[in-house]
Image (cartoon, rainbow, N blue to C red):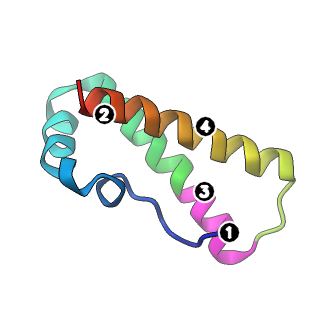
Amino acid sequence: MSHVPHELAAEFPELKDRIHELKTSNAHFLRLYGEYHEINREVHRIEAAGLNVADEHYESIKKKRMELKDDLYAILTS
């Protein structure tokens, strides 16, 4: 487990301004961003605290975080 928070602006520092722009102007991006943020916090909390969760749940939320990150990146670079 990495214990790295994976905040979107840290993942894509070169797109920080674009992230802010889309958060204020694109409702779909904002919804996905919020969902990513919630799931990302849950993953980070599990990793940092060493919480005992079912492997299936942990892998499922990590997969969902990756899918959201891919979707957000596609919007950011379109």
Task: Give the distance between the C-alpha atoms of the residues marked 2 and 1, in whole angstroms.
Answer: 28 Å
Asked whether the residues under the numbered discs 4 and 2 touch, taking CB atoms below 8 Å apart as contact, a structural biologist would say no
Residue 78: x and y, percent?
Answer: 23, 23
Q: Over which residues does the magenta segment extend?
A: 41-50
First reached walking from the N terminus: tag 2 or tag 1: 1
What is the quadrant of residue 76 in the picture? top left
Residue 72 relative to residue 21: left or right: right
Task: Give the distance between the C-alpha atoms of the residues marked 4 and 3, in whole angstroms.
Answer: 12 Å
Tell which tag, 2 or 1, sits nearer the viewer: 1
Q: Residue at x 75, y 47 (%)?
A: 59
Q: Secondary structure at mark 4?
A: helix
Tell which tag, 1 or 4, sits nearer the viewer: 1
**Mark 4 packing: few (<14 Cα in 10 Å), some, or many (20+)?**
some
Residue 17: x and y, percent?
Answer: 12, 48
Q: Secondary structure at mark 3?
A: helix
**Mark 2 packing: few (<14 Cα in 10 Å), some, or many (20+)?**
some
Report the quarter where the N terminus lies: bottom right
Residue type of the residue flagged with mark 4: Lys
Task: Give the distance between the C-alpha atoms of the residues marked 3 and 2, in whole angstroms.
Answer: 18 Å
Residue assigned mark 4: 64
Residue assigned mark 2: 30
Q: Is residue 65 above or below residue 13?
A: above
**Mark 1 packing: few (<14 Cα in 10 Å), some, or many (20+)?**
few
Residue 44: x and y, percent?
Answer: 58, 64
Residue assigned mark 1: 1
Residue type of the residue flagged with mark 2: Leu
